[in-house]
Amino acid sequence: MRDARDATLPEPVTALVADDNAVVRAVLRDMLHPGTGIRVIAEAGDGQQALHAAAQLKPDVVLLDQRMPLRNGLSAIAAISQHSKVLMLTRISDDELVVDAVRAGAVGFLVHGQFTPAELVQAIHAVAGGEAHLSPSAARALMAAVRERNAPDPHGLSPRERQIMELMVAGEPNHRISSRLGIAEKTVRNQVSQIYRKLNVRNRAQAVLYWMQRR
């Protein structure tokens, strides 16, 4: 028979863990033991699974990685945010990713290796309650990105386009730029086309030459 005192205990926060690394998922499960007031109700190993499981189960919080097969975390935030709070939990610490994730609807952003189990638990409870929670590096990245967005650019390029342009100058092909920035290769191609238009050049070689001469 259930103890009457149990009725006064708050319901645990339900969580979905979405990460393509099974070891990471296992570590997170261990961190989120019953004594934390958090219950992991499902896992997902890719972005499509994360979307499906989140839509079916509607957990309070989805711990969402960025780099996953089939669909990355960033592209899934808006849909998941319709019914669950999103806490980005990723190995990528990138100014634009933080800004894009928050803009898409993420309530929190933590970087692996920059939080303790207790801090993760605190973040999940905060996000479940609708409070924003950013790791220190993510908060700094967000502030830096906001400042950079407000700064005029003589070339007319956005901060993301400037990042891509610098990687192009370094000789990185589109697929490597995609991997470095954690965005789809199609997005990189589209933004490269925008760079060509803004710099009034026809190809990659002309763009690199222009950038090196004028930056």
Image: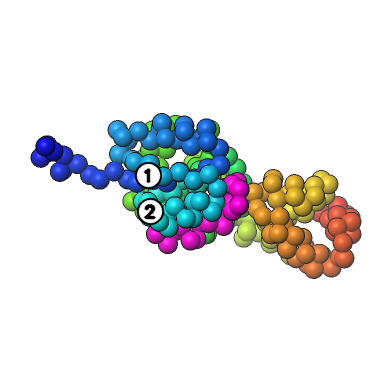
Q: Residue at x 33, y 40 (%)?
A: 38
Q: x%, y% of residue 143? A: 55, 50
Q: CA distance from mark 1 to mark 2?
A: 8 Å
Q: Residue at x 75, y 50 (%)?
A: 175
Front residue of 180 and 60 = 60
Q: Residue at x 62, y 59 (%)?
A: 149
Front residue of 93 and 19 = 19
Q: x%, y% of residue 106? A: 48, 54
Please state which amino acid type lies under the numbered disc 1.
Ile
Left or right: 111 as drawn, with respect to 181: left
Left or right: 204 as drawn, with respect to 193: right
Q: Which residue is mark 1?
A: 41
Circle 2 SS class: helix
Q: x%, y% of residue 162? A: 73, 55
Q: Which residue is mark 2?
A: 57
Q: What range is drawn magenta here?
A: 66-84
Q: Is residue 188 magenta?
A: no
Q: Coloured how?
A: rainbow
Left or right: 68 as drawn, with respect to 3: right
Q: Circles 1 and 2: CB distance less than 8 Å? A: yes
- Residue 75 visible in the current orientation: yes
